Each structure stands twice: as C-alpha cells, then as structure tokens.
Amino acid sequence: MSIFEILIIAVALAMDAFAVSISYGCSSEKMPWKNILTVALSFGIFQAIMPIAGWLGGNLFSEEVQTYANWIAFGLLSYIGLKMASEGIRESNDPPHCENVMNFKRLMVLSVATSIDALAVGVSFSLIDEGIILPSFLIGIITSFICIYGVIMGYKLKEHIGQKMEIAGGILLVGIGLKILLSR
C-alpha cells in the first residue's frame, strides 16, 4: 500500500474525530492550548492504537468487529450527543463551562467511539497482510493535527453563533452515530 493511500485512509478515519473536536470547541467557554492538545492527543492516540489492536486480532475478531462496531459507536456517540444537547437546551444564566460539557471521562468515551472504524481498518490490514506500524503512526499524527484545527474552528464558530452551538454539537454527535450505524 502506498503512502498516499495510507494518508487518504488516515484523513478519512480522522473525520469523525474532527467533527467531535468541532463540537468540543463550540461547547467550551475558554480554549487554552492545554485543552486543545488534550483533545487532539486523545483522539490521535486512540486512532493510532486501534488499528494495531485490530491488526493483532486479525481474523479471530473480524466478524465480531464488523457485527457490533457500528452499534457500539452509535450508542456511545448518541448518549454523549443527547446529553450535550440537553445541557445546551437547559436554561441557565451561566454559559456552559468546558469542564461541564467535555470532561476527561467523556473525552475517553468519544475517543474510543470515534476510533472503532480504525480498529476495523487494522483488521483489514491484517487480512491483506499489510504492515501496521507506519499506517498507525500516520493515522495518529494526522488525526491529532486535524483535531487541533477542529477544536479551534469550533471555538471560533461559537464566538460568532453563540451558546446554541452546544445543541448543534450534540445533534452532530448523534448524526455521526447514525451515519456509522447505517453505513453497513
């Protein structure tokens, strides 16, 4: 497999994490670099680890991954998306705070949910007898950079559109979950 093909796969896998990063940026009152890098590294690390796990599982788990991956991703993304949207709908005088909208536990759940496709890619790489170290590294790096841009873009959107972006971000997460569920 060529580097170009691996880069295309990496960008495609990063799109769900990018959308979630936009949601994170939209729902945050403040956006220090520490938070941006935490989100980007979380998504990037999971996107890099999951293909390796899938590759190691290979044929043994390929059927189970294909059978349940969409449902798992749909459930996780929908749960967090609905919770995020409901928090945005709640009437409050205080704008949402980053800690209330996207805490570490939620970030970990979203990192896993958006990287399930990468697990399936790892399984497919093992089936075609393709190496996994370079693709996993590139997938993780590209995802991290795309997510940095996503968080910043989401934060800038919030400045122009306002608090309603938290609701939109939650709906976006549910939509991503539905897309994943219906994609097979």
Image (spheres, rainbow, N blue to C red):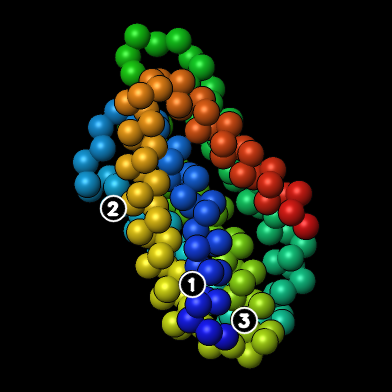
Left or right of 100 in this view: 35: left
Q: Of tags 3 and 1, which is closer to the observer?
A: 1
The residue depicted at 34 percent of the width and 51 percent of the height is: 148
Left or right of 53 in this view: 160: left
Task: Characterize the local packing of mark 3: few (<14), some (14-19) or many (20 or more) Cα atoms within 10 angstroms.
Answer: many
Three-letter amino acid code at disc 3?
A: Phe
Report how far apart the C-alphas of labels 1 and 2 lie in the structure.
21 Å
Looking at the image, residue 162 lies above or below residue 67: above
Q: Which mark is residue 7?
A: 1
Looking at the image, residue 71 lies above or below residue 154: below
The residue depicted at 29 percent of the width and 47 percent of the height is: 36
Residue 59, position as x, y percentages in the image: 71, 82
Q: Of tags 1 and 2, which is closer to the observer?
A: 1
**Which picture quadrant has residue 29?**
top left
Q: Which residue is mark 3?
A: 125
Report how far apart the C-alphas of labels 2 and 3 lie in the structure.
29 Å
What secondary structure is found at the residue carrying circle 1? helix
Can residue 84 be spotted in the picture? yes
Task: Characterize the local packing of mark 1: few (<14), some (14-19) or many (20 or more) Cα atoms within 10 angstroms.
Answer: some
Q: Which mark is residue 37?
A: 2
Report how far apart the C-alphas of labels 3 and 1 lie in the structure.
14 Å
The residue depicted at 46 percent of the width and 27 percent of the height is: 166
Task: Characterize the local packing of mark 2: few (<14), some (14-19) or many (20 or more) Cα atoms within 10 angstroms.
Answer: some
**Which picture quadrant has residue 31?**
top left
Q: Quadrant of the N terminus?
A: bottom right
- Which residue is nearer to you in this view: 104 or 175? 175
Whichever of labels 1 and 2 marks the residue nearer the N terminus, that label is: 1
- Cβ–Cβ under 8 Å for marks 3 and 1: no
